[in-house]
Amino acid sequence: MTVALSIAELAELAAAIKIWGRELGFQQIGIADIDLREHEAWLLDWLAAGFHGAMDYMARHGVKRSRPAELVPGTVRAITARLDYLPPAAADPWRVLPDPELGYLSRYALGRDYHKVLRNRLQRLADRIAAAIGPFGCRVFTDSAPVLEKALAERAGLGWIGKHSNLLNRQAGSWFFLGEIYVDLPLPADAPGLAHCGRCVACLDACPTRAIVAPYRVDARRCLSYLTIELHGPIPLELRRSLGNRIYGCDDCQLVCPWNRFAQVTAEPDFRVRHGLDAPGLVDLFGWDEAEFLRRTEGSAIRRIGHERWLRNIAVALGNAPHSPAVIAALQVRQAHASALVREHVAWALETNQHVNSAATGIPIHSARSERHHQKQDNFL
């Protein structure tokens, strides 16, 4: 049973929680009330538009996502935490993205899986609170349950939701993770964050697939992060060329955001680059068998997509790469892969790669399959 605290004691505890959070390595701690009615209306409208695509889990829990007390009875506040993740000494994204021989992975995935890092640290913060006041009702979350984490972070004063739908902070940009502790303590809530995007639409203009269909409104079905991570089936034909060399996630909207000039590199050893994945060669990555994939992604968020989708994504990137004997040889090795998903994308990559090269040299490539392929593409345009 949670001990009853006076208003003064709750205010003192809230201040202490922020100090303890910084001692645990968080860059910022905020406390939010749980009134998310405005965000609930947005969520329901977003779901009704079908913008969640195949992410059925977004609708599965109904409004528990926007009503914390229905997810965890007794919840009256959410303690929210921010932890920087931009790895130091990582290859410059602006060097990697234009190089079609390299693969680009979202910067958040270059180190250890953030779920484990944040969850453990948030639990330590919850334990510290319990040590100070005795047992209380709480539950820790790190992108692990139906929680509107960006909405809660905005209400806790950690920043504001930008036009690309990421949380932005004036002192830190957007290169950080979020985590929450739902509590039954009526702690004093912080003032919500105020928006500072102004008239800027850099993120909308930069999106490779125009997934940001309007300010603050993202159609996940077109988002490269969704296509390379969440989607289990084939990547839509009309979006494959837009993938470029992005093989796990996409950071374009963050890379162009003016507020990220204030972003700080992380001091967390766990978020340092592993296995050279900040600027890896596509042909080398495509050669990994499943055992090598599992070994190289141990403890990484990348492992969640599995070896099959890893090959699917790289096959598309190789199809977008310049025609070369090394690229063709790498793709041909996978032509008879056990997975139909991999075989489909390898076939597309071989044909696309050769078509691009043929167009550049003026040498036509004719085949019945080629004609059918282009008819299918026309249906998507």
Image (spheres, rainbow, N blue to C red):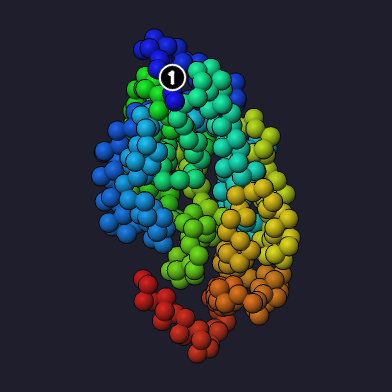
**Location of mark 1 (residue):** 3
Q: Badge 1, how many Cα within 10 Å: few under 14, some, many 20+?
A: few
Q: Residue furthest top?
A: 8
Tell me the quadrant of the picture where the N terminus can be found.
top left
Q: Residue furthest bottom?
A: 368
Any part of residue 281 in sight: yes
Any part of residue 200 in sight: no
Task: Say which of 269 and 67 sits in front.
Answer: 67
Residue 128, position as x, y percentages in the image: 56, 22
Tell me the quadrant of the picture where the C terminus can be found.
bottom left
Task: Say which of 23 and 285 sits in front.
Answer: 23
Residue 219, position as x, y percentages in the image: 36, 55
Q: Is residue 302 above or below residue 355?
A: above
Using the rendered view, name the quadrant where residue 163 is placed: top left
Picture residue at 40% right of the left edge, 17% below the top: 4
Q: Is residue 340 above or below residue 271?
A: below
Picture residue at 56% right of the left edge, 32% below the top: 123
Using the rendered view, name the quadrant where residue 32 is placed: top left
Q: Is residue 236 above or below residue 371?
A: above
Picture residue at 46% right of the left edge, 85% below the top: 371
Horizontal relation, residue 25 to residue 199: left or right: right
Task: Say which of 23 and 110 sits in front.
Answer: 23
Task: Say which of 21 and 201 sits in front.
Answer: 21
Q: Residue furthest front?
A: 1
Using the rendered view, name the quadrant where residue 92 is placed: top right
Picture residue at 46% right of the left edge, 16% below the top: 13
Please tell me how many numbered marks the rendered image carries: 1
Residue type for callout 1: Val
Give SS at disc 1. Answer: loop
Residue 353, position as x, y percentages in the image: 58, 73
